[in-house]
Image: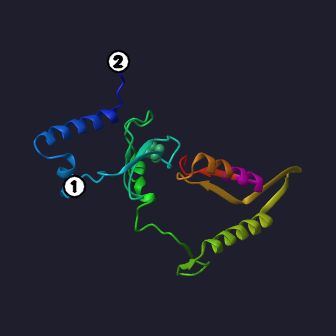
Amino acid sequence: MNKISRRSFFKKGALSIGTMVSAFTLSPDSLWAGSKKEFKTYRTKETTTICCFCAVGCGLIVSTRHGEIVNTEGDPDHPINEGSLCSKGAGLIQTSVNKRRLDNVLYRAPGSTRWEKKSWQWAMSKIAKNIKDTRERTFVQEKDGKPVNRTDGIAQLGGAALDNEECYLIVKLARALGLTWIDHQARI
Ligand code: SF4
């Protein structure tokens, strides 16, 4: 017996309905094109992806039209989530399509009450300098006569949008700097 996935079942079902409609003089194209009820995923390209927000790894379908994301939804064929998503995954489209999302660096100097717009290069250099200065100021070589070589003045907190590979590299860097305060937002 041929196995049929849920997604292809729905696709075949939609195609059958479209064929029935066309038998009554309307083709699926003439039915939907220009119609106010056009599906937002009509004439889109579907690509599967994995939610970036936590280690559950739910599968999603991303629909794009002319290179723009128009919809994201749970992938019913994915073995982990079978189409369902939590509230974070359900809002995944906003990581790309969101007018309110900041796309430049804002910096508030110590004691200041206003935010200044800065370049990414400025931010990278500032972060690197702060890390270097703090590490040199707080590095502990020995504790109770034993070598510890650790940086007590910096903590590292991972975010749920980081994937496995990013977490791996970030923790490698944190350990190399001597950090011991390392945690992840998803665990807290
Ligand atoms: S954040 Fe939610 S949707 Fe995303 S992988 Fe985790 S459980 Fe799944």
The residue nearer to you, when weighing 26 against 128, is 26
Please tell me the numbered disc located at residue 55: none
Residue 108 picture location, percent across and down: 57, 77
The residue nearer to you, when weighing 18 against 70, is 18
Gap in Å between the C-alphas at discs 1 and 2?
37 Å
* Residue type at tag 1: Ala
Residue 177 lies in the magenta-colored region: yes
Find numbered disc 1 in the image and state the secondary structure of the residue it sits on.
Answer: loop
Residue 101 picture location, percent across and down: 45, 66
Seen in the picture, residue 128 relative to 12 is either above or below; the reply is below
* Residue type at tag 2: Met
- Main SS, magenta region, reads helix
Residue 53 relative to residue 70: left or right: right
Residue indicated by mark 2 = 1
Residue positioned 50% across, 49% down in the render: 52
The residue nearer to you, when weighing 125 against 156, is 125
The reply to whether the C-beta atoms of the residues labelled 1 and 2 are less than 8 Å apart is no
The residue nearer to you, when weighing 139 against 94, is 94
Find numbered disc 2 in the image and state the secondary structure of the residue it sits on.
Answer: loop
Residue 127 lies in the magenta-colored region: no
Residue positioned 18% across, 52% down in the render: 30
Q: Quadrant of residue 6?
A: top left
Q: Residues within 10 Å of mark 1 (few under 14, many from 20)?
A: some
Residue positioned 53% across, 79% down in the render: 115
Residue indicated by mark 1 = 33
Residue positioned 60% across, 46% down in the render: 164
